[in-house]
Each structure stands twice: as C-alpha cells, then as structure tokens.
C-alpha cells in the first residue's frame, strides 16, 4: 500500500483532493476492504493519537473513525463538544490549539464550516472534516467507493440526487465532477446547492468530462440514472426551519414510483440516518436496490484509507 501525497494534509472539502488523490483514496479503500475481509490487514500507525471533536451527534462517522484508528493501532480520543469548555464559551480557536499539541490528527464535526477553516489555519496537524454545515467529504468518498465496487468504473455513470441541496449534496457534486460522473440534482427552488459549489464543480467537470445538472424536477433528474441518492430534509442544526423545509420538499420523496423512472436495476443510496416516509419511502429503503448499509460499511474502509494516508 503506497503512502500518497496526503501525508500531513488537512481534508475539509472534496476539493482539497486532486482528481488523482480522490481516485487513489477510493482504490486504496477497495484494497483495504479486501485485506480486512481476508484477515490480512497489516497497516499500522502504532501509537498515533487521533482526537475527535464533535459538536453534533454521530453514529457512523464516529464509529468508523474510532474503529479505523484502532485497526491502525492508533488511539482515538473522542470529545463531544458538550463535555469540553466549548460548552462554557471557550472559543474553538483556543480549543484547537490545545488539541493540536496533543494529537497527530484532529477529526472534527462542526456546526460552521468556517470553524474548520480556522482550525486548519491554527493546527500543525491535519484536520479532517467529519461533517460541517457545508460538506461531508468522508461520506462522498464512501459513496463513490460503493458505486465503484458495484459498477467497476465510475466514469460516465449517472448519479441522481433528489431533495435538499445540503452538505452531503455538495460533497457528492464536487466528487462527481472529479470522477467524470454525470450528476443530476433535483431540489426545490429555495434549497438549491450553493452556487459556489456548482461553479467549482463545473470548472472541474470541463476537465474530466463530468456533467452537473441542477433541476427542479425529480422525475427528470432520475431519468436513466444508475443510482438515486437522497438525504434528510432537515439536517442537524436546522430544526427551527423544519416545518418550512418539510413543506417545500414534499414532492421530492424517493419512492417506488420515482425509482421506476431510473435505469432498470438502479441503486438507491442514502448516507443515513434516514427518515422513512419523508425523503424516502420504507419500501425503497428496504428494497434489494438499496445499498445504504454497504455505504455505511464503506465508511470504515475509507476512514482507514484516509487516516493511513494523512498520518
Ligand atoms: N452518514 C453519517 O455521517 O452518519 P452519522 O451522522 O451517524 O455519522
Ligand atoms: N445532511 C445531514 C447528514 C447527516 C449525516 C445532516 O447534516 O444532518
């Protein structure tokens, strides 16, 4: 397993990775998974300290990173923000300058992406985005790994994303642009992905042959899609807007009727946790087309690849 150019680097956005680096991480994750399954896992980062600073709850991200760290013989130390002095008003800029003196790598789930940017500036060790209000790069890595495992190759595939133009959508759009994937996003007018993300993705897409469409019609977006992806309509931290968002997104549920318009055999994808009956119907989530638990498992293999590469 070669150590790539990521050594010592922070990853706050899919766009912190070159096309080569993003593809290498997917391929490394696929190799990691094979050796984990064969019981031949020999990667080590013995004794390294990986601190996890989380301002929001997590199941998959925390578990995958803690397990990945242990499999690398490193030591994960988790601190929920509520248990730290952040909860009593200590600035995150001070917090990170303590963490960086006691860690080889900081993994952070934050309310505000700008805090991650400040953390990277203030930290001499890599900072990894474990979800912010703007991106979820570790999720996109596992999602494209899942598609690559199933399809063999990513170039030219069509991925439809239906629902809220949120953090998960942003990382998928940036990833699709790097990987030559045709990404078709359907959201209501007021919940489009950020223009900045679309513009950056379009620049990259020029080079890789990817295509990025932003539409209003879920039916149009899923036409001919190899996979249909959705995420919750109300993300963590948006509870105050819940009523308004649920109303605006009502026509955007991924259900059997919508899946019928995708390519025959199209996969259903979701980063989880899912809200059955809102963004996805129970039958689609539980159908044979659903690869959501492969995506969840692949969070582990990609976490190993990322930690191994940056440490
Ligand atoms: N998909 C994901 O990031 O899940 P958690 O919020 O459980 O970590
Ligand atoms: N968009 C969701 C993703 C959760 C993994 C959120 O930010 O809550």
Image (cartoon, grey):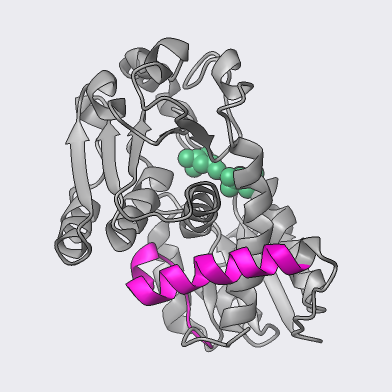
Quadrant position of ligand 1? top right
Q: Is residue 22 left or right of residue 92?
A: left
Which part of the image, by quadrant, shows the N terminus? bottom right
Q: Residue at x 63, y 53 (%)?
A: 298
136 or 309: nearer the viewer: 309
Residue most extreme to the right: 39
> Which secondary structure is most common in the magenta stretch?
helix
Residue 85 visible, this angle? no
Residue 138 included in the magenta stretch of the image = no
Point out residue 78 in the picture as x, y percentages from the top left corner.
74, 63
- Residues in magenta, as a range: 7-35
Residue 203: x and y in percent read 15, 63
Q: Quadrant of residue 250?
A: top left
Q: Residue at point 33% right, 55% down?
A: 155
Q: Is residue 24 magenta?
A: yes
For residue 130, above or below residue 27: above
């Amino acid at each position: 397993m070669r150590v790539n150019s990521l050594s010592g680097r922070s990853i706050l956005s899919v766009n912190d990775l070159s096309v080569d680096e993003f593809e290498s991480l997917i391929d490394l994750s696929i190799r990691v998974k094979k050796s984990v399954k064969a019981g031949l896992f020999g990667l080590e980062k013995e004794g390294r300290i990986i601190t996890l600073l989380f301002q929001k709850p997590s199941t998959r991200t925390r578990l995958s990173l803690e397990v990945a760290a242990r499999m690398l013989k490193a030591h994960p130390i988790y601190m929920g923000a509520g248990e730290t002095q952040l909860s009593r008003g200590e600035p995150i800029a001070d917090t990170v300058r303590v963490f960086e003196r006691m860690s080889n790598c900081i993994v952070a789930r934050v309310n505000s992406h700008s805090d991650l940017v400040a953390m990277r500036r203030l930290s001499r060790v890599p900072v990894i985005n474990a979800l912010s209000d703007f991106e979820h790069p570790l999720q996109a890595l596992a999602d494209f790994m899942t598609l690559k495992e199933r399809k063999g190759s990513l170039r030219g595939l069509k991925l439809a994303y239906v629902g809220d133009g949120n953090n998960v959508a942003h990382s998928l759009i940036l990833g699709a642009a790097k990987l030559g994937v045709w990404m078709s996003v359907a959201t209501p007018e007021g919940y489009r992905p950020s223009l900045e993300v679309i513009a950056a993705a379009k620049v990259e897409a020029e080079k890789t042959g990817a295509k990025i469409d932003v539409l209003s019609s879920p039916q149009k977006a899923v036409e001919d899609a190899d996979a249909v992806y959705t995420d919750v309509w109300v993300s963590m931290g948006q509870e105050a807007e819940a009523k308004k968002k649920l109303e605006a997104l009502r026509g955007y549920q991924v259900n059997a009727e919508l899946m019928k318009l995708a390519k025959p055999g199209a996969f259903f994808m979701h980063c989880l946790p899912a809200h059955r009956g809102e963004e996805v119907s129970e039958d689609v989530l539980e159908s044979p087309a659903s690869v959501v638990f492969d995506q969840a498992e692949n969070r582990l293999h990609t976490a190993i690849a990322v930690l191994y590469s940056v440490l």
